[in-house]
Amino acid sequence: MPAGRWVVFDTNVYVAALREGIDGAAFARIRDRTPRTFLASVVSAELRAGAVDRVGRLAVRELVEQFDRLGRIVTPDARSWNLAGDALGNIRRREPALRAKVTSLWNDALIALSARQIGASVVTGNVRDFELLHRFMPLDLEPFE
């Protein structure tokens, strides 16, 4: 990945960091990239939906507030929504075996296209789904391993 490039972390990266804790490798990777990081509003929503206890909800709220204060939250615009619809429609038509998967790809498509709006790469552990999306829409992907 080019030095200085903006990144958007997928939800699974934040979940890995929360599971490993502050001393874990995932947390360190996020911390090291923080100066070049935007938070996708879709990721924020997924994190909020997945926070099961008070501590988790507080952690998510604080994370989102920090990005908001910095003006670093990216939200899919109308063009991104339309491109996502086109890409997912093409997957449905051209990949009949994957039709059932299309519904679960919406958020990933919106995360990828939000990142594209600001010229950022998506950092994800969910490489398979993002590679599928990349066949049908432009995105810059960085595997999180």
Image (tube, rainbow, N blue to C red):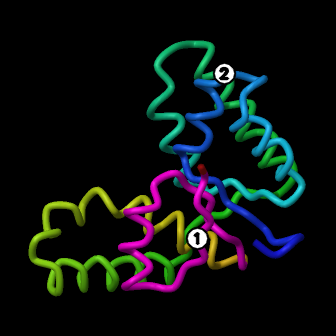
Against 141, residue 26 (above or below) is above
The 10 Å Cα crowd at callout 1, few under 14, some 14 to 19, many 20 or more, is many
Kind of residue at badge 1: Leu
Closer-to-camera residue (36/79): 36
Judged from the image, the secondary structure of the residue bearing numbered disc 2 is helix
From the viewer's perspective, is 26 left or right of 71? left
Magenta stretch, residue numbers: 119-144
From the viewer's perspective, is 49 left or right of 40? left
- The residue lying at 89 percent from left, 70 percent from top is 4
- The residue lying at 62 percent from left, 65 percent from top is 142
Against 144, residue 91 (above or below) is below
Against 90, residue 29 (above or below) is above
Q: Position of residue 88 (x, y in %)?
A: 29, 76
The 10 Å Cα crowd at callout 2, few under 14, some 14 to 19, many 20 or more, is few
Give the position of the N terminus as an image quadrant. Answer: bottom right
Asked if the stretch drawn in magenta spans residue 22, the answer is no
Residue under label 1, please give it: 141
Q: Position of residue 114 (x, y in %)?
A: 59, 70
Residue under label 2, please give it: 58
- The residue lying at 56 percent from left, 75 percent from top is 77
Kind of residue at badge 2: Leu
How far is mark 2 from mark 1, CA to CA? 29 Å
Compare marks 2 and 1 and give the one earlier in the sequence. Answer: 2
